Amino acid sequence: MRALGDEHSDAIMAWRALVGGSWSGLIEYADGFAAQRFDAIVASSKRLLPTESAELAALADGAGIPERDLWVLNLRGDLGRDGTGCSDLAGLAADGGVLLGHNEDGDAEVRELIRLITLDIDGDPCVTVLWYPGMLPANSFVTTSAGLSFGMDHLPTAVPNLGGAGRHLVARHAQRQTDGAAARAALTDVPCAGAFAFNMIDEPGGRADVIENVSGRVAAARAETAAIPLRHVNHPCLVPDGTRGIPDDDRWLAESRGRGALLEAGSVRAATAADVMSALRAPGVLNTEEHLYTYATTVVDTARGRVLVRGHGDEWEGDLAAFARGRRAAPVVTA
């Protein structure tokens, strides 16, 4: 992680230096109203997930930025109510594989900074991540050489769990696992301070799951029928009373529910990677506003061993195994 911070320090510094940007606003919040909350969640994260906490410290050291600043950025969504963003489809493909599609959404302020990176760390699976410079590489779309792929959806929480871990660290902990069972256990056993929906496919296990971890309250669903995907956007659907403390007229909650309805209507049948890509790029699901912008859509198709990526330009299709290891390779064509 130190090498990652060093190599991309200019991008990390560029985001940190944005006048009136989201990162500077988070620092003001953590220094003021949320100071006690921030200190408690940092301490709890270090206790529950020491390896991932050490990775965050190494990333800060490599970038030459105060560790506290990186903690503030990475606890976005753990300190209280915070925006919205991201849509996912996960399910069983008609040809016997599993599919995962993910829209990565966020503020347009970082659309020129976000990038694909690959981590190759001794003892861990290789992971390829759609990365926000400064964040622990874990909170967006991730695929690993262990045959696991993840898409994370922000969920709102009004009151965080001060005994939980930062949700980015929980995600990173799961993505370092070498099999699906261990990854699912990581996502259910470690309470998040804030909340995420973890959409996950397990190629060796042949399964697709959604796990909601809402401040430590956990519920999950598994895809059971081919071509009928699990769908998720930015409000809890599985944890009972998951929006507790969020007003029903909250504008972000309304936006998520509306986008979720459009996603459901556009994915009545999602049997192929092309179906999933089409549903996620549909008007109203694809976001184009400054405050909510889709950086990229990524689809994993394990049966065909392929990954599809579409950002600002044309769609790219590549070999999934090579992609997870950081290599750009054309898909293998079989007779």
Image (spheres, rainbow, N blue to C red):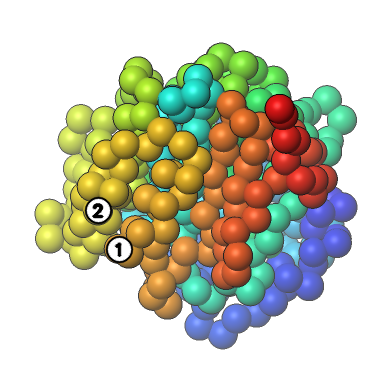
| Disc number placed over residue 284 in the picture, else none | 1
Residue identifier under label 2: 262
Along the line of sight, the residue nearer the viewer: 47 or 148: 148
Three-letter code for the amino acid on which mark 2 is drawn: Leu
Q: Name which residue lies at 69% across and 76% down.
A: 14
Residue that extends furthest to the bottom in the rendered view of this protein: 19
Q: Upstream in the sequence, badge 1 or badge 2?
A: 2
Q: Are marks 1 and 2 in contact (CB under 8 Å)?
A: yes
Residue at horizontal 41%, vertical 72%?
288
Q: Is residue 183 left or right of residue 50?
A: left
Q: Position of residue 244 (x, y in %)?
A: 19, 43
The residue at the point 74 percent across, 52 percent down is: 117
Neighbor class of circle 1 (other Cα within 10 Å; few <14, some 14-19, many 20+) is some
**Residue 275 badge:** none
In the rendered image, residue 164, in percent from the top left (x then y), is placed at 46, 35
Q: Residue at x 45, y 68 (%)?
A: 293
Q: Quadrant of residue 126?
A: top right
Give the secondary structure at mark 2.
Answer: helix
Of residues 323 and 256, which is closer to you in this image?
Answer: 323
Quadrant containing the C terminus is top right
> Percent x, y for residue 189?
48, 21
Tell me if I can see residue 240 in this picture: yes
Q: Amino acid at mark 1?
A: Gly
- Residue 32 in view, yes or no: no
